[in-house]
Amino acid sequence: MIATTSVRHVSEQEFPGTLPLEEQLHFLVRYAVLAPSARNAQPWRFTLNGDTVLLRADPERWQRVADPDQRELYLSLGCALENLLVAAEHFGFRHSTAYFPDPSDERLAAAVTFGPGGVPSPERSGLTLQALLARRTAHGPFTDRALHVSELRALEQSARDGEVVVTFSEAPGRRHAVAALHERACEVLLGRDDYRRELAELVGQGNFGMPWPLAKVGRLALSRESIAHWLERAELASIRSTPVLALISAPGDDHRAHLRSGQVLERLWLAATARGLGLQPASAAIELPETRVELAAVFGIGERLVPQELVRIGETRGPRGFLTPRRPAGEVVGS
């Protein structure tokens, strides 16, 4: 079972500014591990080495059925990396990131070197520590309120990147086309015993924050195709209700593209959170090669770009989503 730990209660007043740099970087990692990850697998490990934080993939957290090419694993690492950088800029650090610095070690996704004298970058302006703590996945339908132009501009600002492209859409016709692709993909994926079995195992382990008895019931329920498709229909209704869809794409489909896309995803998520908006990934259509190609055509992104993640954004209806548990710090941080 994943345990809820003190990492959820980090406070900027606890920042150890008078202690050695490595202690300060250990504190920043407490914000990094609050990042979202596919099915809350938290597939990351951090190593502290003087003025550098090394971010590695944790192969034991790889979901081999749902994520055979590790796209979602490295997207998740990108989200954690972005949280680290947002926190670093808040506390006045400058930073330099080397992506996949060791060609012989694919698990080493990034090496980030820190120093004093940093200034906030334009794409991270307005992304606060409060947003890092408050961010969660928005489940369920959104209200029918259209996003204000200032909200859209803030989202676009956060998504600016030299490699990754985010395409926003408010068009009802495109939304219905995306919903149809999502439905087709879910029919295929949830019709597979191995796919449902892997998802049920994650639920049973407590990845989604359910109390132990409910997690065991959920694990049993998801092993049944009828229950899984009921959940699919609920998610489909949510997609049809969303005022804005955003497709994150990259000029390539290697792990660097996945990692950079994850960084943009997290900035977009934090920008939405800071403005009281909800965001939820809807990746089923990207998990199947055929619907992934069709999704690119629906958004008109051309052949140069490859879809990496699809999200829906809007004003939440009712209570906000719940906070998911986090792995103990001792499992993910070393020196």
Image (cartoon, rainbow, N blue to C red):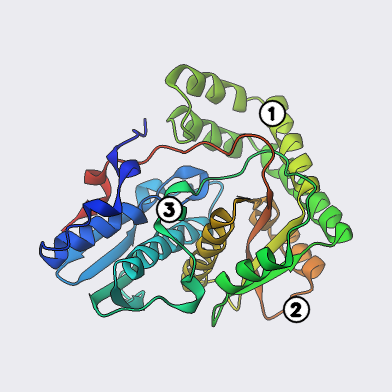
Residue type at the position of mark 2: Gly
Q: Residue at x 56, y 38 (%)?
A: 321
Residue type at the position of mark 3: Gln
The residue furthest right is 173
Foreground disc of the pair 2, 3: 3
| 3D distance between C-alphas at marks 2 and 3 | 37 Å
SS assignment at label 3: helix
User: Left or right of 219: which side holds 52?
Assistant: left
The x, y position of residue 72, in whole percent, is: 52, 56
Foreground disc of the pair 3, 1: 3
In the picture, the disc for residue 225 is 1
Residue type at the position of mark 1: Glu
In the picture, the disc for residue 130 is 3
Query: In the figure, residue 302 lies in which quadrant?
Result: bottom right
- Position of residue 225 relative to residue 30, above or below, is above
Query: In the figure, residue 114 lies in which quadrant?
Result: bottom left
Other residues around mark 2 within 10 Å, as few (<14) / some (14–19) / many (≥20): few
The C terminus appears in which quarter of the rendering? bottom left
